[in-house]
């Protein structure tokens, strides 16, 4: 009896033997990641590498421009020409003004709609959630075409209602802002609403016990906890603002207030295709990417500083 008990104790104390011949988890993970890695390299890294390489070359022609074109290494000349290009600088300035005004309004509307959907007294949540999201499901070009009809004075049903011309020099930028806001409010609202759904109900119960009403709970509990979602949507909005293309391109067909180089991406297209200067066009696109990355980083750092300052208080 004692021998049997001793063997049982030894069996429990012995470490389990590793089974040989089974594929490791790392190999299985590599197999599943291989298709993504191949597509990522082919359709993301290779084009970026090709674009960076093209930005260091220029095409020059001899004989008053009628000679055989020759592709020569130009170093940073294309990037120097980008910052000396007044059309590019003006386009960046327009987008900065556009983003400073439009992005806070859009995110504010998204936050308000998300809080309304998350409120205890909200009804028909699925219906309104789908209704708010529907504009995002419309392709950007189609949305711009639809709004261009609403902006055209001769055929617009809003012509007699609006006290100004939405396609004038002073109003066309904000007409684009209206299109962008209409399109993206629903998407940002869903991101914030998903964050609200993950907040534990115990926090709401604690706030109610402390005497906080609906507005105080929303401001002091909900908004601080969805701040990461607000930062995420803010970064997306900054990048999307600098990539503004569909709306001005469509509106440029119906008004002279929008030129062919109204935004940096439109300027890059004009330089690359109309001027046949692919090196400088690529340099414009890369410079814009660096600006977007820098502004996004500054926005994240500013949000972190404001959060830390609020916590310390």
Image (cartoon, rainbow, N blue to C red):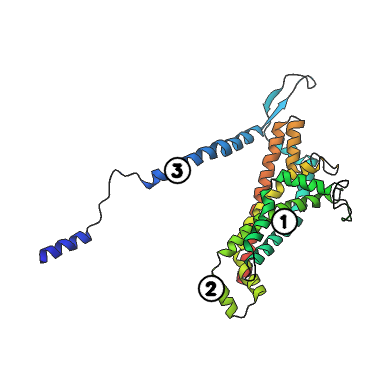
**Residue 223 coordinates in the image, percent (x, y):** 63, 67
Q: Residue at x 58, y 39 (%)?
A: 44
Label whose residue precedes the other's in the sequence (3 or 1)? 3
Residue density around tag 3, few if under 14, some if 14–19, many if 20 or more, within 10 Å: few
Instruction: Please tell me whether mark 3 sits on a helix, a strand or a loop.
Output: helix
**Is 92 situated above or below 269?**
below
Find numbered disc 1 in the image and state the secondary structure of the residue it sits on: helix
Q: CA distance from mark 1 to mark 2?
A: 33 Å
Residue 307 pos. (x, y %)? 62, 65
Q: Badges 1 and 2: C-beta atoms under 8 Å apart?
A: no
Rounded to the nearest whole Å, what is the CA distance between mark 3 and mark 2? 39 Å
Q: Which residue is mark 3?
A: 32
Q: How many marks?
A: 3
Give the secondary structure at mark 2.
helix
The answer to whether marks 3 and 2 mark residues whose Cβ atoms lie closer than 8 Å is no
Of the residues tagged 1 and 2, which is closer to the observer? 2
Q: Nearer the viewer, mark 3 or mark 1?
A: 3
Mark seen at residue 202: 2
Is 154 left, or right, of 247 in this rendering?
right
Task: Give the side of residue 110 with respect to residue 178, left or right.
Answer: left
Where on the picture, by quarter, is residue 272? top right
Q: Which mark is residue 191?
A: none
Which label is found at residue 103?
1
User: Where is the C terminus found, in terms of image quarters?
Assistant: bottom right
Distance between mark 3 and mark 1 Cα atoms? 38 Å
User: Could you say where residue 87 lies in the image, as x and y percent from the top left?
Assistant: 80, 41
Front-most of 101 and 156?
Answer: 156
The answer to whether one can see residue 298 in this image is no
Query: Disc 3 or 2, which lies upstream in sequence?
Result: 3
């Amino acid at each position: 009896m004692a021998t049997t008990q001793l063997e049982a104790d030894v069996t429990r104390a012995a470490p389990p033997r590793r089974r040989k011949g089974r594929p490791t988890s790392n190999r299985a993970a590599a197999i599943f990641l291989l298709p993504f890695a191949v597509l990522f390299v082919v359709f993301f890294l290779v084009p970026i590498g090709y674009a960076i390489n093209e930005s260091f070359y220029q095409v020059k022609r001899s004989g008053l421009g009628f000679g055989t074109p020759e592709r020569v290494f130009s170093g940073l000349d294309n990037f120097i020409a980008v910052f000396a290009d007044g059309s590019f600088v003006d386009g960046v300035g327009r987008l900065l003004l556009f983003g400073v005004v439009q992005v806070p309004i859009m995110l504010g509307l998204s936050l308000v709609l998300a809080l309304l959907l998350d409120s205890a007294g909200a009804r028909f949540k699925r219906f309104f959630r789908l209704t708010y999201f529907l504009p995002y499901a419309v392709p950007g070009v189609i949305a711009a075409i639809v709004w261009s009809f609403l902006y055209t004075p001769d055929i617009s049903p809003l012509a007699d209602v609006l006290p100004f011309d939405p396609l004038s020099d002073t109003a066309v930028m904000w007409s684009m802002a209206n299109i962008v806001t209409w399109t993206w409010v629903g998407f940002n609202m869903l991101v914030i609403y998903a964050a609200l759904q993950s907040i534990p109900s115990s926090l709401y119960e604690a706030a109610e016990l402390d005497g906080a009403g609906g507005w105080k709970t929303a401001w002091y509990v909900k908004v601080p906890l969805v701040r990461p979602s607000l930062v995420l949507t803010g970064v997306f909005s900054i990048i999307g603002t600098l990539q503004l293309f569909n709306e001005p391109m469509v509106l440029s067909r119906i008004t002279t207030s929008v030129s062919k180089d109204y935004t940096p991406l439109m300027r890059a297209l004009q330089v690359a295709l109309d001027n046949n200067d692919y090196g400088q066009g690529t340099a414009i696109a890369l410079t814009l990417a660096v600006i977007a990355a820098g502004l996004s980083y500054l926005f994240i750092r500013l949000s972190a500083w404001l959060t830390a300052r609020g916590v310390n208080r």
